[in-house]
Amino acid sequence: MTENERHVVPNNERGGWDVVAPGSSRASSHHDTQADAIARGREIVGNAGGGELRIHGRDGHIRDSDTIAPGNDPNPPRDRR
């Protein structure tokens, strides 16, 4: 786990999407759409000095990962989307 990491995960009880820190009992924020949760997650990680944002699909599996500056992307040439 990196020092500053957040996950965008589906909220099965309330619907929508949550931005959560690993090991936290509460969500940092809740959103109706995944796009809104991703934008807020990037903002939270960026304000904290950079790190990793892990984006989960509806099935709960990680489908994407984003390094937020000034985080350290271990393979920058391979990170093409």
Image (cartoon, helix red, strand yellow):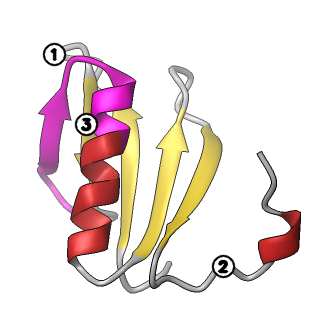
Amino acid type of the residue tagged 1 in the rendering: Arg
Looking at the rendered image, the disc whose residue lies closer to the viewer, 2 or 1, is: 2
Q: Is residue 75 above or below residue 65?
A: below
Closer to the camera in the image, 38 or 29: 38
Q: Which image quarter: residue 61?
A: top right
Which residue position holds label 2? 73
Q: Where residue 57 sits: x, y (%)?
A: 55, 28
Secondary structure beneath label 3: strand
Label 2: which secondary element: loop
Q: Which residues are magenta?
A: 23-38
CB of mark 1 within 8 Å of CB of mark 3?
no
Q: In the rendered image, which quarter contains the C terminus?
A: top right
Query: So how many labels did they put on this image?
Result: 3
What amino acid type is highlighted by mark number 2? Asp
Q: Is residue 27 magenta?
A: yes
In the image, 9: left or right of 18? right
Label 1 – label 3 distance at C-alpha: 10 Å
Provide the residue designation for mark 1. Answer: 14
In screen coordinates, is 32 left or right of 41? left
Q: Nearer the viewer, mark 1 or mark 3?
A: 3
Check residue 57 for magenta coloring: no
Q: Is residue 38 above or below residue 25?
A: above
Q: Find disc 3 in the rendering and name its residue.
A: 18
Q: Which sits in the foreground, 18 or 77? A: 77
Say which of marks 3 and 2 sits in front.
2
